[in-house]
């Protein structure tokens, strides 16, 4: 099926894009397009105007400054997958990227596009939440930052206002004493998560000084689990500690049963995946060398 | 709605098109440029039959609009034989194409153009992949015939050619194949040459009762 007619706008700067978004009547932003294009083709979305931001070169960066790991709006999933910086100390990003879609999709789809689409089964939202990250939005009234835990409101609905463009996603810098991971349960290669968990642990010696746990696909949005964080901080990592954190995550989840599994099954998987994700996060926080060399390889396919 | 002028280099030739913004890249390639080797399978972005090699990456041409390809360089399956690596093996074909032919990497052939372009992207980045790396890299391409085993072998064949290694003999009989082999994975045929089942074609089979 063909998409409905639309005008294609190609701004080359953020300012131009923001002006266009303010002037046009209910425009849609096109970045990677791996969800938007099929949505338009099935006419679930029929925008009169599409603002294509792919020509805004200044939005294509993945870098660390003193305080944050920063991903511009044009960073593709594949860029994260191939980034040595990410591999070094951002295990959750390194885990999640290759588990999204397939290689062709990852070459095009963007991290920011995925987050702003706010699919409750989207992977990046949980990674962002577990890292206490935020997004930076530019609108007609200037720039503002939205913390991850205020961003997701309903399925496909965020706190973003009409006319706003997310230019950047960022998380606090992860140092050598911090580790994170992402564990995803899916039926087959390239599928959405039935359930998934992002976890982050920061250590001072053997004491947990900071932590984050967030869940994918088991509520109407990606959700953080503050109860698990509270339970972990100040304690020494142990199997018992993570077991309880897993139970707290399962209690916080609110999955719906479907053809892939009952609600009880998914809740149990949240418990199990939380324990695994925390174990990987701690191993990476303690270990030296790239985060990618620790933890479970979830990519194994075939025999 | 206004049409847009788009210029893209397809298989080494610069092409100029005027397209509606809603026109998908795959439709521009197939219908405006008449390059119908690029297939449309699922129409939803799942099957990978429409995969082309665009600016150094494999992309699904049904998941982007043609206007997004303005200024880009695209290779489709029709351009494989024109690439510098073509002819490195035993034929004029690109080693990947030759691999699919020799290793029986296709049956109906519908997924093959997409498989070949996904494999090209893989071998461009890593010319000596493991079986597992091949499987990960073609995970965006569906094949309903082969069960993927021979596709993996086909890509390995291309990798052998690109690395100056002797590729394996074809498991299938070709006119130009000197070794007669069985089609079940490269085992040499047993004495008598017939490795088929035990059905005796000369036997008289019952034809049923007279009332039939």
Image: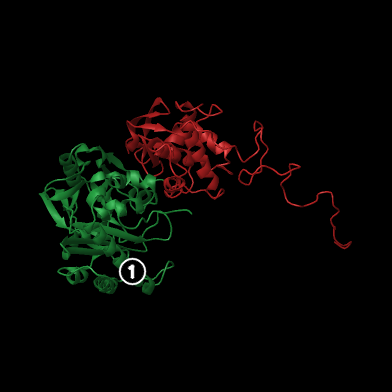
Chain colours: A green, B red
- Left or right of residue B95, residue B67 in this image: left
* Image quadrant in which you'd find residue B52: top left
Residue A188, percent across and down? 43, 57
Q: Is residue B205 above or below residue B117?
A: below
Q: Can residue B153 be seen here? A: yes
Give percent across and percent down for residue A45: 33, 52
Residue at screen point 34% across, 51% down: A98
| Residue A144 as seen in the image, left or right of residue A190 | left
Q: Nearer the viewer, residue A152 or A233?
A: A233
Q: What residue is rendered at 74% in x and 44% in y?
A: B194
Relative placement, left or right, of B79 versus A76 is: right
Task: Please name the residue shown 65% across and 35% down the image.
Answer: B174
- Using the rendered image of the protein, determine whether residue A219 is visible from the camera's viewpoint: no
Secondary structure under tag 1 reads helix
Q: Which residue is mark 1?
A: A272
How many marks the image carries: the answer is 1
In percent of width and height, residue B203 lies at: 85, 52
Q: A13 or B32: nearer the eye? A: A13
Q: Residues within 10 Å of mark 1 (few under 14, many from 20)?
A: some
Relative to A294, say whether B95 is above or below: above
* Residue A19, image x, y percentages: 16, 42
Residue B2 higher or lower than A185, as above or below = above
Chain letter for mark 1, please.
A
């Amino acid at each position: 099926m063909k998409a409905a007619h639309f005008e294609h706008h190609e701004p080359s700067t953020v300012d131009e894009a923001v002006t266009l978004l303010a002037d046009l009547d209910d425009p849609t932003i096109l970045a990677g397009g791996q969800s938007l294009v099929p949505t338009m083709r099935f006419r679930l979305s029929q925008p009169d105007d599409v603002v294509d931001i792919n020509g805004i070169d200044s939005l294509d960066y993945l870098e660390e400054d003193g305080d944050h790991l920063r991903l511009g709006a044009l960073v593709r999933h594949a860029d994260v997958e191939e980034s040595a910086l990410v591999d070094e100390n951002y295990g959750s990003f390194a885990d999640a990227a290759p588990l999204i879609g397939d290689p062709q999709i990852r070459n095009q789809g963007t991290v920011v596009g995925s987050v702003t689409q706010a699919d409750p089964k989207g992977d990046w939202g949980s990674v962002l939440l577990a890292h206490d990250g935020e997004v930076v939005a530019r609108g007609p009234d200037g720039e503002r930052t939205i913390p991850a835990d205020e961003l997701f409101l309903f399925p496909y609905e965020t706190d973003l206002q009409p006319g706003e463009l997310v230019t950047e996603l960022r998380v606090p810098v992860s140092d050598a004493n911090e580790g994170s991971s992402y564990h995803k349960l899916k039926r087959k290669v390239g599928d959405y998560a039935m359930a998934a968990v992002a976890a982050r642990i920061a250590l001072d010696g053997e004491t947990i000084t900071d932590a984050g746990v967030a869940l994918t696909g088991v509520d109407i949005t990606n959700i953080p689990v503050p109860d698990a964080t509270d339970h972990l901080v100040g304690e020494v990592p142990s199997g018992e500690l993570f077991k309880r954190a897993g139970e707290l995550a399962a209690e916080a989840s609110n999955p719906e049963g479907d053809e892939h599994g009952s609600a009880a099954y998914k809740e149990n998987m949240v418990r199990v995946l939380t324990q695994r994700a925390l174990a990987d996060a701690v191993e990476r926080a303690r270990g030296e060398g790239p985060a990618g060399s620790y933890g479970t390889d979830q990519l194994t396919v075939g025999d | 709605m206004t049409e847009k002028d788009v210029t893209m280099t397809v298989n080494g030739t610069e092409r100029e098109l005027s397209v509606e913004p809603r026109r998908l890249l795959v439709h521009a390639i197939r219908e405006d440029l008449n390059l119908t080797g690029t297939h449309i399978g699922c129409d939803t972005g799942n099957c990978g039959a429409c995969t082309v090699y665009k600016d150094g990456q494999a992309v699904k041409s049904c998941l982007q609009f043609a206007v997004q390809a303005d200024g880009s360089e695209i290779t489709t399956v029709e351009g494989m034989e024109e690439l510098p690596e073509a002819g490195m093996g035993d034929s004029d074909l690109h080693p990947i194409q030759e691999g699919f032919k020799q290793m029986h990497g296709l049956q109906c052939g519908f997924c093959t153009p997409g498989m070949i372009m996904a494999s090209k992207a893989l071998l461009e980045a890593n010319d000596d992949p493991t079986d597992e790396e091949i499987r990960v890299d073609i995970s965006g391409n569906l094949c309903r015939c082969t069960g993927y085993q021979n596709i993996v072998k086909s890509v390995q064949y291309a990798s052998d050619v690109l690395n100056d290694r002797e590729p394996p003999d074809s498991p299938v009989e070709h006119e130009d194949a000197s070794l007669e082999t069985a089609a079940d994975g490269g085992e040499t045929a047993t004495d008598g040459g017939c490795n088929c089942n035990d059905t005796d074609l000369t036997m008289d089979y019952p034809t049923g009762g007279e009332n039939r």
